[in-house]
Image (spheres, rainbow, N blue to C red):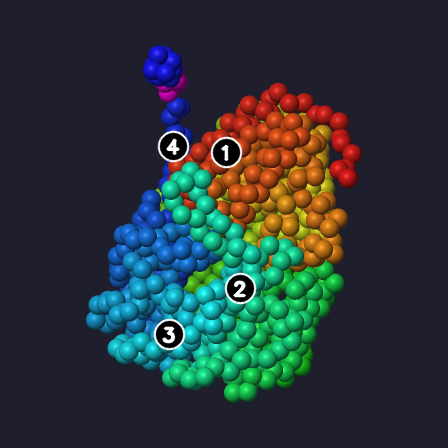
Amino acid sequence: MPALLCPFLLAAAVAADAAPTPPPSDPFLRQYAETRGFRAGRPTGVQLSPDGRTALFLRSGPRSRAQALLETDLATGVTRTVVEADGAGALSPEEAARLERQRITARGITHFVLSPDGARVVYGLGGRLWLLDRSAGRAAPLPGSEGALDPRFSPDGRALAYVKRGDLYVRAVPRGPERRLTRARGPQVTNGLAEFVAQEEMDRDEGFWWSPDARRIAYAEVDESAVERRMLCDPARPARPCEARAYPRAGTPNAAVRLKVVPAAGGPAVEMRWDAGRYPYLAAVRWSKGGPLALLVQDRLQREERLLAADPATGATRALLAERDDAWLNLWPGMPAFLPDGRFWWVTERGGAPEVELRAPDGARLGLAVPRELGYAAFAGVDGDALVFAGAPDPTREELYRVRPGSAPERLALGEPGPATRKAVLAPCGGNVAVTWSTLRRLPVTAVFAADGARLAVLPSVAEEPAFVPTTELRQLGGADGIRAAVLRPRALGAGARLPVVVDVYGGPVPAYYVPQVAHRPMLIEQWLADQGFLVAVFEGRGTPRRGRAWERAIAGDLGTVPLEDQVAALEALGREVPEADVARAGITGWSFGGYLAALAVMRRPDRFQAAVAGAPVADWEQYDTYYTERYLGLPGDRAEAYARSGLLAWAPRLQRPLLLLHGTADDNVFLSHSLALADALFRAGRPFELVPIAGATHAVPEPLAAERRWEWTAGFFRRTLGAVRPGPALAPAP
């Protein structure tokens, strides 16, 4: 054996010596990855103090993940660091999962809560909670708070509630003993935490809610006993133990969620009663001054919902209103928004697009407040009786508005004039507002404005700025009712150059309040890709939000056909309208749903797409979560054909174009098993492909080197493939 082994080792050594030196890293790509897409160093998590004097926010260094807590004096503009954070310390599995659901890749201080009087701040750091006295400038750890999650002050500021080891606790502040309010009924039961689909799909991170008088707490009891477990393992590190995750895939049992109310002083809990068999989803809970304990519940297919008012003393509920949609109902974070007199704002799409109504305390409709033409997009807050919101009269840009009962909405001219995307945060008592905006040429800027619109301060950024300005052109392909597109050309484009096209796609349904891909935002990584010698295009076809109900719901029952048809139609229109676009050499790339659509494109339409890079694709919709998948496709047992038609596996034998699959091994949203199932189907069908498992990466791929390599591989793959591949014949649909 030694005689055989030595020559092998020698050959390996010679091969290693002869291996070419890896090419130097692209300076921009390295900068983009290490700055988290130039987000590092910019203010985030902004909160305004109730007295209107201060803005508090989180900020990291320009190439750091560790966020510190800072505050800006709005009178002087002086900013100081309140709490430093080095980001050290391992996260618990529960905390890591919550951050992944929220797509937060920063570390250090990731959240903080401000007391109602603004005197104290609570934040998590190093695996426990800290209480900061702002006037004294001192912070101290809260005894016994190790492992605590989601701290929240009571409305009177005298107590703090949080969840620890799956149960709800409360303690007086600044000093007081910890009191346990709940005891889980079993090892798979938690009290006060949101279940997976609530966090991932409903935008409901909360699992408990204080009563306005601070005497009681409503909390979600989540029983995951019937939910399937998936083992999250890292095959690159087989010595590490696997983690069991409760993951409700389509057609399987969800967590059973109940809402209970417990006295803050301790005592027996009262369960709120509704027809949970018909309406199993607890989509939202509101308990604000002037309003009832309000529950928004939905049926499993999300075609019906009821807004209920609950009696916290008896558990009885009564209906305030009902909504129904034959396709699905969208959720609107912040809604319903109650006023001090019990009236409330409500968003509906019964008229074919989002509109805001004012409702009486008993749920009766009082009138239309925001017409569909303003394109209601996102809740910003309530200022007295006024609703402040972001609207998108044009899907590519946002404006801020304020509407009062009985009055027409007024536009708030806050932030940089001209087309932009905008979001706002109101002070707890109204008045001041923090606005963050970005444009095609400008990365996000945050400033605080007074009630009269005067700019009080710009919150300082220490972020690095890119060395170039994107060439983004927004256009509507095919006329006024056509598909909106963003087109980016190489900055060193020669006159008359014909360029292969790379379509950067998401292309699928997202929550209606998300900013679309085609919008007034800086498209930096898309510009880098264009600079590698491509014309990069982004298309917003049917199924995407902000074009009305019919446009968005055109995909009901089939997640693949309509989105792909629109990508093809947009590509063909691009070829007619943009002379330098060589659509005969077209590639497509995307991540998550975009990865699914990219892989589908080269399987179903090889006559239009010559290569694809698919990141974290959903290969089999029966293996994705209940809430998202069933909204569009129904239950697998009832709609087996829709699931087969929408998946990738049936199309695998038709692949005839180059396909590169990228997938993180620690992805707990779209599990690596999706790409492995697709790889197995392709392998057994004898179809060549490439698969790169990214060791330890989650769905967000936060590690800088992995993010850098992702884009290097994407550009290199298209350089290799688009110059050599020629269009082939269209294929008949798969059975």
Which of marks 4 and 1 precedes in the sequence? 4
Residue drawn at the location 53% of the way across and 80% of the way down? 271
The residue identified by callout 1 is 692
Which of marks 3 and 1 precedes in the sequence? 3
Separation (CA) of disc 1 from disc 2: 35 Å
The residue identified by callout 4 is 27
- Residue 699 vs 97, above or below: the answer is above
Amino acid type, residue under disc 4 in the picture: Pro
Which of marks 3 and 2 precedes in the sequence? 3
Q: Which residues are magenta?
A: 14-21
Residue found at the far bottom of this picture = 313
Amino acid type, residue under disc 1 in the picture: Val
Q: Nearer the viewer, mark 1 or mark 4?
A: 1
Q: Quadrant of residue 247?
A: bottom right
Q: Which mark is residue 225?
A: 2
Q: Quadrant of the C terminus?
A: top right
- Residue 726 vs 551, above or below: the answer is above
